[in-house]
Image (cartoon, rainbow, N blue to C red):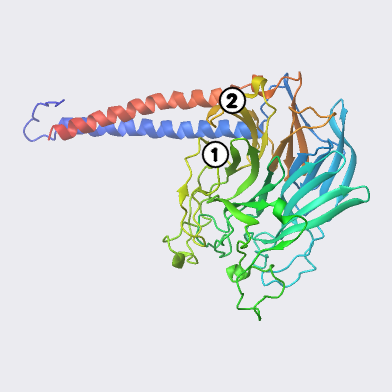
Amino acid sequence: MRWDFPPPPPGCRNPVIRSFRFRVICVAIVACGGVSLAWRSCSESAQRLRSEPLYDASRFRLSPLAGTGIINPTVLQFGPDGALYVATRFGLIHRLEMERTPEGYRAARVETTALVAELPNHDDHGRPQPGVRGRLITGMAVTGTAESPVVYAVSSDPRVERPETDTNSGILSRLNRTAAGWRRSDLVRGLPRSRNDHAPNGIALEPDGRTLYLSIGSATNMGAPSEAFLGMSETPLTAAILAVDLERLGDTMLDLPTLDDPARPGAHDQNDPFGGNNGANEAMLPGNGIVRLHAEGLRNAYDLLWTPAGIMTIDNGPNAAYGGRPRGHTARHRHQAVEGGESLTNPLYFIPRPGLFFGHPNLARPAPAAYAARPGLHFLDSTNGLTRMPAGPGGSHLAIAAISLDGSLTLVTFDRAGLVLHRRVLLTGLRGMPLDVTTGGGAAVPSDSLWIADMGESAIYVFEPVAGQPFPASRLSREPVRTLMARCLLWWVPMRAGILHTARLVRARWASR
């Protein structure tokens, strides 16, 4: 459409131009005010969601686990003996026997083992560091039988953001509970970790117990070295999920092969496989195939969950100002530092088969051959712990619960093909650093209860239905969510009208020329 305007009177400025400018300025002021108020409204609603626990108190109950005294829990899982196993920030593993109380649950008996915490530490040159006590445990899986529980735990150097952190410090251990006490066997040593907080993380076991999957965090933020990650580059085993053949490994201990460190004399470096020396002594895959790459390009997947459709995980996306992408795609760009970076979401992935690549660049490995499909679900905040919910009637759907660092607990339901059917926020407002979540188990603990390890609060929380109704059938209060949506729509309508009106004015102005 062409708009025709009458010519201006002689000697006068075009009144249409004045009208056009005036209207554009007015619309711009209204739009900016709308954006500002909408942003403030959204921020207030988000703050309310984070500061006030949201759940229907008539249907659900949130209570702290009493009688534990556990400091900095990181991962937790119920074992085949009905006890709750909890690993901590500095390597202790607690076994808790539960009893029900009117207020919730209480640990009637606590049994603690320090076998993992007693593992020796080294610096990044491989030199023993007896003064560094404890081990960081961020991955654990409990299996075995009620009479003989077995715990798989992966630990690493407890130091974070320190240049002397041993970047080959990861150890996969197996703990057997016997009549005489706990017995530890170290299975794989020399697993890599970053100098920041990315480490060997989640563990998942196949039901037959023959293969163990282990997540290894990245050594960088977005693929290139940076100051925030203390200049470390990616190594051949970082930013990946490894598969360990437990059947072939048996009761032997495997030390991962490393490069020949030029700073250490001899063909076999002293104190190997420890001391990554910033990549000069980096760990590599063994030639026997007992440890192999299962998936690549996962920046920092904290927890792994085995399902019949494959491994499920949530990958923690990068953060702004923590480091950027490599300047190129060849190995010569591997050690070039790139600052900056951006904050991205946290995608949930199904890994149906080995050999897939999920996006995080690692120039220490050959270019990936197969790219994975896009995720069907994203979390805005760092999301770590995953657990599978009890199967519903017929078992046709898969439901999982995920815990995020913003204090929210989310329920996600999938169909058999892995497509998301429902996503529901169960709980918000946890104020510490919730890292892991698991479902209940045993005679004293119902299977539809959710147990949360909060490292920041040094607490374990229990979230369960009061009336025994399963979570997928529950109706939760969504008033704050509705309020947030209503406020966004309230300001989106006038902003959209103003934008469209401005566009019409601009088109009319250009058409009149």
Identify which residue is drawn at 78% across, 64% down: 120
| Amino acid type, label 2 | Pro
Q: Callout 2: helix, strand or loop?
A: helix
- Residue 225 horizontal side relative to residue 162, left or right: left
Q: CA distance from mark 1 to mark 2?
A: 17 Å
Q: Is residue 213 above or below residue 429?
A: below
- Residue that lies at the very extreme toward the bottom in this rendered image: 265
Identify which residue is drawn at 68% across, 67% down: 273
Q: Position of residue 229 (x, y in %)?
A: 58, 60
Tally of marks: 2
Q: Disc 2 marks which residue?
A: 480
Q: Callout 1: helix, strand or loop?
A: loop
Q: Is residue 421 above or below residue 181?
A: above
- Residue that lies at the very extreme toward the left in this rendered image: 10
Compare marks 1 and 2 and give the one earlier in the sequence: 1
Q: Position of residue 457 (x, y in %)?
A: 75, 43
Q: Is residue 295 above or below residue 56?
A: below
Mark 1: few, some, or many residues within 10 Å (few <14, many ≥20)? some
Q: Is residue 167 above or below residue 114?
A: below
- Quadrant including the N terminus: top left
Q: Position of residue 261 (x, y in %)?
A: 61, 75
| Amino acid type, label 1 | Leu
Res 423 label: none
Q: Disc 1 marks which residue?
A: 380
